[in-house]
Amino acid sequence: MPRLKVAIVGAGTGGLAAAYDLARAGCAVTVFEAEAQVGGLAGGFKEPRWEWSLERFYHHWFASDADILRLIEELGWTNRVRFHWPVTAAFHGGGFHALDAPPSLRVPGAPWLDRMPGALFLSRILHLSRFPALRKPEALRAGLAGLYLVLTRDWRRLERVTAHEWLSRHMGRRCYEVLWGPLLVSKFGACAREVNMAWFWARIKARTPRLGTFEGGFQALLDALAERIQREGVFVRLNAPVERIDSHRDRGLGLSFRGGEGTFDHVLFTSAPGRLARLTPTLPPEYRARLLNLKAMGAVVLVLALRHRLSEEGTYWHNLPKRAGFPFLVLVEHTSFVSPEFFDGEHIVYCGDYLDPAHEHFTLSQDELLARFLPALSRINPAFKPEWLRASWLFRTPYAQPIPFVHHSAAIPEIKTPVPGLWLACMDQVYPCDRTTNFAVRLGRRAASRILRESGTARA
């Protein structure tokens, strides 16, 4: 019996995880990646003097990210996973205020706390009584509403209402205006008041205070995974963007890519749904319209290598409300989470933003963005001087954060498309969960399982 031929479009975390399972089940797998390296949005880069790679778009894991941690365990690399408890702070009233419990209240080495649903959110809700913008009764009200969210499992009821409406009503107008409203505006811009509450629920449900990374950086993990699947017989084609997908009926699916063509029994597409709509002319018009109707925010990230630490308090994550005049939504000091020693003593800072792909920050040059962003760093640390900057890198993507409107589950396409043998595994489909490498692994492996099951291929 001939081996099942499967093409995977996209060498991100989900695509590589799917390739691993399919290859071990005996399939002949080819992965097509448009870029010169594997990794997708979780990929990174490395300066010659650095020991570790650095993610282009800031990434970390939560201790509850069971799917990717399970895959790492299967591969025998658990000893290369590192967890820390960094500090998050929010800007309010001209200064930053910690949202995490102080060190004296933390419970080191308590895995039950790491795995407890909503542990991160609960720790912050409990800490709200210390937040200067809220009175104790307001913090208590927010805490009770937060406890309800952590305990409830009925996310489908929550997707019938917007996060703006639910949080304003149950946590109080003041709490919403100070904390959650700015978060939604920063994340979704003009669509902030249309995002459903199920997205917010899923965002806080499984997050933990401790955050993890991989020794050497995420690119080190993804390169190692690519090497492993190639040993399993997977052919990884880099610099090979797919240009067209055709259905040949009895002859399977035809793939046209830069440099050639191929025919496959199955194609698993792991990139943006709109791109699948444009590449596949045989998709039914109704299904194509469904893909094109899905909306997403893009991401613009300026990465800075500084000669000095920016946050005097050693804060990792700085939430920055747009109404306070910051030109980006978050400042992440990566080397408050991972030691600067891995980056030749340099201090790595991300200035990140989620924006409509039509925003001018997608067309401005790197120098123009630096001119807009750098003055804001003196609001983080008044001692900052432009001379601290050694180097910078700019990364942008138009598909970074799906926008989940009310009743969003009805809009999400199935993994199995109407074209026989064509499958889709994209960020929209992890809903109500937020897009992360963990859920990309879960989705990729689920898609691989469906392909194997429906083709009658038994696992090896």
Image (spheres, helix red, strand yellow):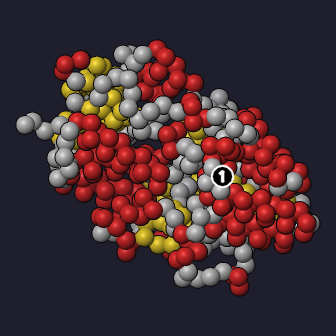
Q: Going 67% across and 43% down the picture, which residue do you hit?
A: 157
Total marks drawn?
1
Label 1: state its secondary structure.
helix
Rendering coords of residue 44 (x, y %): 45, 53
Taking the image as shown, residue 435 lies to the left or right of residue 24, namely right
Question: Where does label 1 land, which residue?
Answer: 201
In the foreground, 128 or 117: 117
Above-or-below relation of 307 to 457: below
| Label 1 crowd bin: few (<14), some (14–19), many (20+), radius 10 Å | many
Please name whichever residue, 302 or 336, is drawn nearer the observer in this view of the structure. Answer: 336
Q: Three-letter amino acid code at disc 1?
A: Trp
- Does 428 sit left or right of 262 as displayed? right
Indicate the quadrant containing the N terminus: top left, top right, bottom left or bottom right.
top left
Quarter-of-image position of residue 367:
top right
Say whether residue 11 is visible.
no
Q: Residue at x 45, y 62 (%)?
A: 66
Could you tell me residue 339's position as x and y percent?
A: 54, 73
Q: Position of residue 259 (x, y in %)?
A: 25, 28
Name the residue at 73% across, 35% down: 194
- Pick whichever, 446 or 218, lies toward us: 446
75 relative to 410, above or below? below
| Residue, far bottom | 104
Q: Is residue 265 visible?
A: yes
Residue 210's place in the image compared with 16, above or below, is below
Left or right: 234 in relation to 397: left
